[in-house]
Structure formats: C-alpha cells, structure tokens
C-alpha cells in the first residue's frame, strides 16, 4: 500500500529537493554544475508533469459530477442532490487536489474519502440512476491502495459499500443482490484498470523522487568531503607559510638573542650589533606576517631583491660570506612563481643556518627560456641521502611539484649541499 506521507511527489517531497543550479567550482569531490542543472530541470519537469496529471484527474472528477447534475436536472430529482454533488466538488478542490500536488498531509485525503463516500452513498440511495458515481468515487482510493492484495481488498470493500444502496433500496431480493454484485464488480474491475495506471504513475514519480533524493544526499556528502579537504589543504598551506616565514624568523631571533647574551659582558659593541640585527629581523618578520595575512606573501618585493635580503640576513646572523648571482634575461613573473621560488630559497637558507656549519653560501637565479632555475649551494658539512626527507625538504619538494617543477637535492657528508629548483613560467 502506498503511503502518501512517504511517497511525496510535489514541491515538498523527494522529487522537489532543493538542488542548486548555480555555477559550481569544478574541483575534485564536487558535483559538476551541468549535472546539477540536469537534475534540477528533471525535478521541475517531473513536478510540471505531475501537475498536469492532477489537473486531468480533477477535470475527469468534475466531468462525472457535471453529468450527475445534468441527470438530476433532467429527471427533476430532489434539490438536496445538488448540494451533495456540490459538497463532493468542494471536498475534492479543498482536500484531495492539494494533497495530490504535494502528498504531505494524508489526513486531508482520508477526510476527503470519508466525505465523498458518505455523500455518494446518499446520492445513490436517493437516485439509483446515479450509481455510476460509485466507481468514480472508488477511483479516489487508487492513490492509497496500490496493486497488492491489501489494496485489492480495500477496493473490493469500498466498491461493495458504495453500491450497497442498490441492494437495500428496494428491499433484499435475488434481483437486487445480483444488481448489487454486478455494480460492485464492475466498479472494482474498472478501478483495477484505471487505478493500476494511476498507481504506476505514482510509483514512477516516487522512484524519480528517490533518485533525486539520493543524488542530493550524495552531493551533500561530496560537498562536506570537499569542504573538509579544503580545510585540510588550507591548514597545510598555512603550516608551510608559517614554517617558511614566521618560524624561520623566530629561529633567527632566538639565535641572535642567544649570541648577544653570550657577549653581553665581554663585548658590548658586538652585543649591540646583534641586538640591532635582532630588532631588524623582528621588524622584517612582522612585515612578512602582515604580508601573509594581507594575501601578498612577497611583501611587494621583486624576487631578486627578496633573495638578496634573505642572503644578507643569514650572512649577518652567522658571519658567513654570501653571494647572489642573477643570470639570463629577467622577465615578469607571476606571484605564484615568485612565492614558490622565494620559499624554496628561504627553506634552503634555513637548513644552512640550522645544519650546514658552512663558511659560504651562494644563490643562483637563472631566467631560462621556459623555466626559472634557483640553486642554493653551501660548503658546509653536507648530509647523508636519507637525511634529505625532513619536513622542510618535503615542503620544498611539494611546493615545486604543485607548479609542475622539479626539485633536486645533492649532498654528501663533508661535501656541502646544493638545492636546485626548476620552476616553469605560468
């Protein structure tokens, strides 16, 4: 048996779930916009089709009532029959038709069935020529009955009840019982055929509604997964930016303060120089933090200027010789290429600061035909191959690979380290 409250077809039911048809960002894990538009259009067309079916059903119902009104007028039957027929029309328009459109409130449909069954029984009792109304009223059970055994039982009981006046009005007799059985059987067979088509239409709409509901649920899950992936990606991006900028700046500050503390009593001039360098580093770090929050990671500096400043800072901190060599024909760079290149240089210099114990470090920036090449080389203690996979190294490699470039790290114990990044132009 079809449950009206669960098999909603109208705008509030499964077939009318809200499906955004606006432009979508074509990222992994998100339903493409054309698919959503197709689902939304299918939902609208499904509802329009159902509106047409409900309208045809209403026209057929009122056509039967009009025929009954004409028969009452021609045969000069009692006036109360007009009132009964008007009540059946009003019940359909106020209760049954709205329910057919959205099928959200089954109580309205049940009240309608009770009203029209009572009025139909009275009409057939008052005028046997209007017995044809019995199968018409019986058709109102079709949306609730289905084609199962229980549905057929409901239709059979309703058909017998609606045509019962035929057996009772003239007194029980074999003739009246036969007429009753014939009328009830005819009403039942007619509605088994008509109701069958109606029920199949309902089932088709319900299946479509379930499909759209499943698609919408899947889309919601994909949106949630996409949001979670976006949050994780943004968190990783911020972690990289903080590691490559603020964390390195704080490391420099800590080393400078510790160095100043070591010469505080013995060499005031050196202490003052280191504290001044620490203050300048703090200001630069603050500027980088503001630039990071303002969406300008390069702080408005050209790439070669930013590289020279980074090299000069580490030279002053560690007292080592630094050099920056710019080769090739400079060309305008996108912000993404500048950020990736600068961050690789900063991380490579940070590794020099923490691990290399080098005397010199050199940066080469070469503008090639199709790509920008950055190389950072020191003459420090170097490292074993298995040590080239720390967080900083992975961060550099991931940054370069995200823009389609390649990172190469060459190092051996006692032979220094060379970090080379090839970044394609965008």
Image (tube, helix red, strand yellow):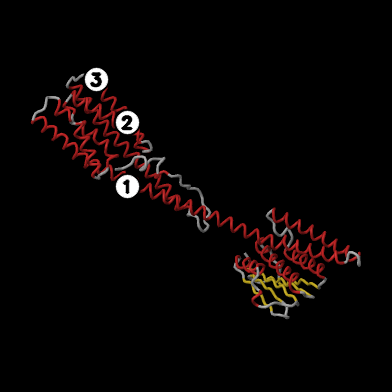
Q: Is residue 215 above or below residue 390?
A: above
Say which element carries label 3. helix
As measured in the structure, the alpha-carbon distance from the residue carrying label 3 to the one carrying label 1 is 41 Å
Q: In which quarter of the image is the N terminus?
A: top left
Q: Earlier in the sequence, mark 3 or mark 2?
A: 3
Residue 357 position by quadrant: bottom right
Q: Is residue 109 left or right of residue 286?
A: left
Mark 1 neighbour class, 10 Å CA radius: few under 14, some 14 to 19, many 20 or more: some
Q: Earlier in the sequence, mark 3 or mark 1?
A: 3
Q: In which quarter of the image is the C terminus?
A: bottom right
Say which element carries label 2. helix
Image coordinates of residue 305 in percent, x first then y, are 76, 64
Say which element carries label 1. helix
Discs 1/2, front = 2
Q: Which of marks 1 and 2 is nearer the N terminus?
A: 2
Q: Is residue 371 above or below residue 132?
A: below
Image coordinates of residue 22 in percent, x first then y, are 50, 48
Judge by depth and name the residue closer to the eye, 179 or 409: 179
Residue 69 position by quadrant: top left
Residue in the picture at 32% in, 37% down: 54
> Of the numbered discs in the image, which one, if any, rests on residue 204?
1
Residue 147 position by quadrant: top left
Image coordinates of residue 286 in percent, x first then y, are 76, 56
Q: Mark 2 points at which residue?
A: 111
Q: Mark 3 points at which residue?
A: 80
Residue lying at the far left of the rendered structure = 174
Residues at badges 1 and 2 in contact (C-beta under 8 Å)? Answer: no
As measured in the structure, the alpha-carbon distance from the residue carrying label 3 to the one carrying label 2 is 21 Å
Residues at badges 3 and 1 in contact (C-beta under 8 Å)? Answer: no
Mark 2 neighbour class, 10 Å CA radius: few under 14, some 14 to 19, many 20 or more: some
């Amino acid at each position: 048996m079809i449950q009206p409250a669960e098999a909603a077809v109208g705008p509030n039911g499964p077939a009318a779930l809200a499906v955004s048809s606006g432009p979508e960002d074509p990222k992994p894990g998100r339903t493409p916009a054309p698919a959503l538009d197709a689902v939304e259009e299918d939902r609208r067309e499904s509802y329009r089709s159902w509106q047409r079916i409900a309208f045809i059903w209403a026209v057929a119902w009122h056509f039967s009532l009009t025929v009954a009104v004409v028969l009452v007028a021609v045969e000069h039957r009692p006036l109360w029959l007009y009132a009964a027929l008007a009540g059946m029309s009003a019940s359909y328009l106020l209760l049954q038709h709205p329910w057919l459109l959205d099928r959200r409130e089954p109580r309205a449909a049940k009240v309608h069935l009770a009203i029209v069954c009572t009025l139909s029984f009275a009409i057939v009792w008052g005028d046997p020529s209007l017995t044809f109304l019995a199968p018409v009223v019986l058709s109102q059970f079709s949306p609730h009955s289905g084609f199962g055994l229980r549905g057929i039982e409901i239709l059979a009981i309703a058909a017998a009840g609606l045509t019962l006046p035929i057996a009772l009005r003239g007194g029980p007799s074999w003739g009246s019982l036969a007429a009753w059985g014939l009328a009830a059987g005819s009403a039942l067979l007619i509605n088994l055929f008509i109701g069958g088509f109606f029920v199949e239409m309902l089932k088709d709409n319900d299946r479509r509604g379930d499909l759209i509901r499943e698609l919408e649920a899947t889309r919601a899950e994909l949106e949630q997964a996409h949001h979670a992936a976006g949050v994780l990606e943004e968190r990783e991006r911020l972690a990289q930016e903080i590691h490559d900028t603020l964390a390195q700046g704080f490391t420099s500050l800590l080393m400078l303060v510790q160095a100043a503390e070591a010469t505080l009593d013995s060499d005031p001039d050196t202490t003052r120089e280191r504290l001044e360098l620490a203050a300048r580093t703090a200001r630069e770090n603050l500027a980088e933090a503001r630039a990071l929050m303002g969406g300008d990671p390069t702080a408005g500096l050209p790439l070669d200027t930013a590289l020279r400043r980074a090299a000069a800072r580490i030279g002053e901190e560690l007292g080592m010789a630094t050099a920056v060599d710019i080769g090739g024909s400079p060309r305008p760079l996108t912000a993404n290429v500048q950020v990736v290149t600068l961050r690789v240089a900063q991380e490579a210099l940070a590794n020099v600061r923490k691990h290399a114990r080098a005397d010199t470090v050199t940066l080469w920036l070469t503008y090639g035909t199709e790509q920008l090449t950055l190389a950072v080389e020191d003459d420090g203690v170097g490292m074993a191959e298995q040590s080239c996979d720390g967080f900083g190294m992975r961060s550099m490699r991931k940054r370069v690979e995200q823009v389609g470039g390649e990172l190469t790290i060459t190092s051996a114990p006692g032979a220094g380290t060379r970090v080379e990044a090839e970044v394609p132009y965008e």
